[in-house]
Amino acid sequence: MTATLIDGKALSSKVENEVKERVEKLAERGVTPGLATVLVGENQASQMYIRLKHSACERVGIASKNVALPENCSEETLLSRIAKLNAQDDVHGILLQLPLPRPLDPRRAMMTIAAHKDVDGFHPQNMGALLLGAEGLVPCTPRGIIYALEQMGADLQGAEAVVVGHSNVVGKPLAAMLLNRNATVQVCHVFTKDLAAHTRGADILVVAAGVPGLIRADMVKDGACVFDVGINRVEGKTVGDVDFEAVKEKAAAITPVPGGVGPLTVSMLLSQTVWAAETACQRRA
Ligand code: NAD
């Protein structure tokens, strides 16, 4: 079997078209959705991610601006800058680019972002709502994976789902989202004793470990649906966590790296920013 490619670029352009229509509807009410990103320091990868997010905003008509703070910025400065964005009516979404330079505490900074502007879905209030099954603003990568599964018509109810990686950004929120859709979910991580024993049973396998080549073909069930979240640089190339060439001969569907989960993550950020603007409009009405 050669797997169907889950084309993240095509899915994300579909999302962008939907987002554009929602932006036009907001314009009829005199509202332009606004995203503010906050970048501390000069991490090159972070600068590249910020550029990608701003050009995506531009494509769909979201007004975006970046607040650049110096590497040695104090916590007080960072938190007061975020508080200022919280108070601005034209800013509907705030995204704090991680990682933060030490000794800044990302958790405290995240908690300073107003929950209704937290378009990355990391605020405890939004995470709590997600766990309770009331999904509002949720982390963008898991939302993108769920969107792709829904577009593929995957039946999640009772599906055996295995998530490799238990980060707050991907693994934990994704596990909650799959549970909310009645999948049977196992979460594996670096201390899991026999990873293959778990992954071999997965109808849906999501890998977010940051370890190139972690998932080999013999660890994948025939006909599984495989999402490779990993982004690794190996010999000048960007690769995921899955041995793509071998696994695609076994899986029914698989995401490539690049061009799979990454573009979906960005388009979910756009969708959530517009959702935050729509919700702000409803609150004012
Ligand atoms: P993280 O570094 O916070 O956590 C890694 C997780 O993988 C942990 O739960 C750890 O226990 C687990 N892990 C590590 N080695 C393992 C092993 N040998 N076996 C099993 N589990 C193992 O990771 P993160 O922030 O969730 O990111 C994971 C990967 O996904 C990274 O490569 C990151 O760049 C990528 N990422 C991609 C996107 C995207 O949009 N495509 C978004 C977020 C993260």
Image (spheres, grey):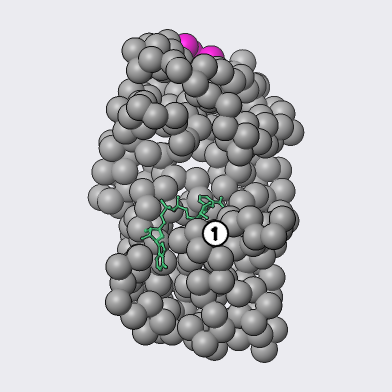
Tell me what residue is drawn at x 51 percent, y 37 percent: 272
Residue 235 visible in the snapshot: yes
Is residue 217 toward the left or the right of residue 164 in the image?
right
Quadrant of the snapshot with the C terminus: top left
Whether 59 is drawn above or below 113: the answer is below
Give the residue drawn at x 37%, y 53%.
167
Classify mark 1 as within 8 Å of ligand 1 or not, answering yes or no: yes
Q: Nearer the viewer, residue 98 or 120?
A: 98
- Residue 234, percent across and down? 65, 60
Give x and y (percent) for residue 21.
68, 36
Q: Quadrant of the N terminus?
A: bottom right
- Residue 220, given in percent of the width and then of the height, sits at 50, 83
- Region in magenta: 86-90
Given residues 90 and 161, the one toward you in this image is 161
Whether residue 162 is situated above or below residue 264 in the rendered picture: below
Q: Does the magenta stretch mainly form a helix, a strand or a loop? A: loop
Q: Amino acid at mark 1?
A: Gly
Q: Does residue 25 sit above or below 239 in this rendering?
A: above
Residue that mark 1 sits on:
230
Q: Position of residue 125 (x, y in %)?
A: 28, 36
Quarter of the image where one finds residue 179: bottom left
Q: Is residue 236 magenta?
A: no
